[in-house]
Image (cartoon, helix red, strand yellow):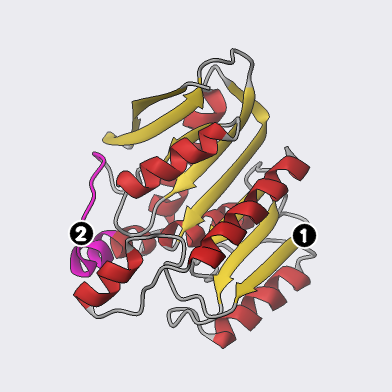
Amino acid sequence: MSIHTENKNYYIGGKNFKGYLAWDDSVSEKRPGVLVFPEWWGLNEYIQKRTEQVAKLGYLAIGVDMYGDGKTVDNPKDAGSLMNAVLDDKQIIKTRLEGAYNVLKEHALSDSRRLGAIGYCFGGALVLNMARMGMDLRAVVSFHGALDSFFKPTPGEIKAKILVCHGEADEFVSEEAVEQFKSEMDTFGTDYDFISYHGASHGFSNPAADERGRKFNIPLSYNENADRNSWKSMKELFENNF
C-alpha cells in the first residue's frame, strides 16, 4: 500500500481553502470518499494523520479546512475566536461544508454515491449538522463532538447513518444535551447509534489532549481504550454502509 497525499486548494466566495487529500495510489479504481473535519485547532498534523489513516482503510479522504488558507492555531483563545466566527453564521457553515463536500464528490477517484464524513470536537458537530441538512452521505461519525443542532431537519430528511462516539465524562457536553440529541434523532426517525465511553473526557481520541489540558487548564484528556474502540466502531459502520 502506498498512501499519496497532496494539498488541494479550492475557493468559496473568493476565499482560498486548503484541503488535505490522501489515498492509496496502488489502486486505480474509484472508491468511497470520507471527509475528515478537525477540532477547533484547524487542519493540523493530527487531522492530517487521521486523514491518512482513513485512506489506509481503502477510502479517498480529505482533511477539511474550515478557516481558510489552511490556518491552524495552538491556543484556546484563538481557536474559539475562529470557530465562533464560523458558527455565528449559518450561511458560512453551509457554504464551507458544501464546498468541501463537492471537492470530494467531484474527485476523479471518488465513488460519489458512497460518501461519508467524520469529525472531532468542532468537526463532530459539523458532521452531525451535515446529516441534519440532508446531505447525501451514507454515514457520519462524531468523535467527542458537540451535539447542538444548527439546522432543523424535517422527518425523513436525514439520509446518513449516524454514529456518535461520546466521552461519558465530557464536561463540555451536558447530560441535557445528550438527552435532547437522542430525542431529536428519535423524533425524526434517524438511524443512529450513540456510544458513551466510561471515564472518557473531551478530546479522548487525541494523544495531545493530556498536555493541552494541563497547559491551558481545560478538561481534556486522552483515553486509549475509547480511542481504539471508537475507531473500530467507525470502521464497522463504513464497512456496513459503503
Judge by depth and name the residue closer to the eye, 228 or 183. 228
Judge by depth and name the residue closer to the eye, 122 or 102. 122
Badge 1 marks a residue whose secondary structure is loop
Which residue is at 27% across, 42% downward?
68
Left or right: residue 49 compared with residue 85: right
Which residue is at 50% across, 59% downward?
124
Note whether residue 95 is visible: no
Q: Which amino acid does label 2 sit on?
A: Asp
Q: Give the range drawn in magenta.
A: 69-82
- Give the quadrant of residue 152: bottom right
The quadrant of the rendering that contains the C terminus is top right
Left or right: residue 16 compared with residue 234: left
Q: Position of residue 203 (x, y in %)?
A: 42, 67
Report the number of numbered marks.
2
Give whichever of discs 1 and 2 has the lower sequence position: 2
What residue is shown with label 2?
Answer: 74
Circle 1 packing at 10 Å, graded few (<14), some (14-19), many (20+), is some
Which residue is at 20% across, 73% downward?
215
Q: Position of residue 30 (x, y in %)?
A: 63, 19
Q: Is residue 76 magenta?
A: yes
What residue is shown with label 1?
Answer: 191
Which residue is at 55% across, 68% downward?
149
Judge by depth and name the residue closer to the eye, 211 or 108. 211
